[in-house]
Image (cartoon, grey):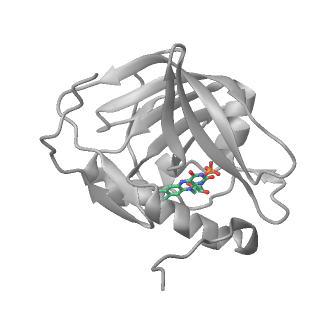
Amino acid sequence: MENFELIDFNEIEPKERYKLMSENIIPRPIAWIVTENNGIINLAPFSYFTGISSKPPLLMVSIGRRKPGFDEPKDTFKNIKETKKASVCLVPFEMTEIMNKTGEVLPHEISEAQKFDIELEKVDNNFPPIVKGCKRAFLTTLYGTFENEEMATIPFFLEIKKMYFEGDFEPAVRVGKGYARLCETEIEDEND
Ligand SMILES: Cc1cc2nc3c(=O)[nH]c(=O)nc-3n(C[C@H](O)[C@H](O)[C@H](O)COP(=O)(O)O)c2cc1C
């Protein structure tokens, strides 16, 4: 007997699809996104996140709508739509625990940074601050979204305008529901 399954994604629930995708498309980097709207700073992590183009320099973050009915946008979703700006921080491994806490759903008017006592740092007057201690961050503007009625999670394409870069950096990555660190490899791409 063959030792494999062919799983029909139409026949499984979205939760099961998420499990299969997040445990197998790995590791996933984490975008810790700072947005600012009417003076309130919002901070939230996203791991449907990747770089997609260098010309123009674009990254993609997929942001869910909230239940019930998926009609209520997450704060990050609403803020980027309204202000067209986001500071996308990469998470140093030592900040994994505190980053994870900011995934909690809070009312719109409450800042995760304030609630969890996370220090922010203004590095450019035209963009939201970054999380202090994040050694890499992208200051971005909204390039576009891809939306339709069927989609519970909407891809946001963000254009990188500036990159904050400071010293050595070891990123936290997501594997399934857990977190991991990367190890060194000696294999190099000779075609690059
Ligand atoms: C590590 C991690 C990764 C996450 N990735 C995503 C994601 O890719 N898309 C998403 O919609 N929510 C994701 N979430 C959940 C959001 O962070 C969570 O819904 C958060 O409350 C949204 O905050 P906001 O309403 O302040 O924007 C993730 C949570 C964690 C802890």
Q: In terms of image quarters, where does ligand 1 lie? A: bottom right
In terms of depth relative to the viewer, which is nearer, 146 or 190?
Answer: 190
Q: Position of residue 95 (x, y in %)?
A: 31, 52
Q: Is residue 179 above or below residue 165?
A: below
In the image, is 100 to the left or to the right of 73?
Answer: left
Q: Is residue 99 above or below residue 58?
A: below
Location of the C terminus by quadrant is top left
The residue lying furthest to the front in this view is 1
Q: Position of residue 75 (x, y in %)?
A: 68, 46
In the image, is 54 to the left or to the right of 171?
Answer: right
Report the number of discs: 0
The residue lying furthest to the left in this view is 186
In terms of depth relative to the viewer, which is nearer, 182 or 129?
Answer: 182
User: Residue at 57% across / 48% down in the picture?
Assistant: 111
Q: Quadrant of residue 123?
A: top left
Q: Position of residue 122 (x, y in %)?
A: 42, 24
The residue lying furthest to the bottom in this view is 1
In the image, is 129 to the left or to the right of 170?
Answer: right
Q: Quadrant of residue 164?
A: top left
User: Residue at 32% across / 37% down in the picture?
Assistant: 134
User: Residue at 46% across / 55% down in the picture?
Assistant: 25
Q: Position of residue 136 (x, y in %)?
A: 33, 31
In terms of depth relative to the viewer, which is nearer, 61 or 21?
Answer: 21
Q: Is residue 132 above or below residue 182?
A: above
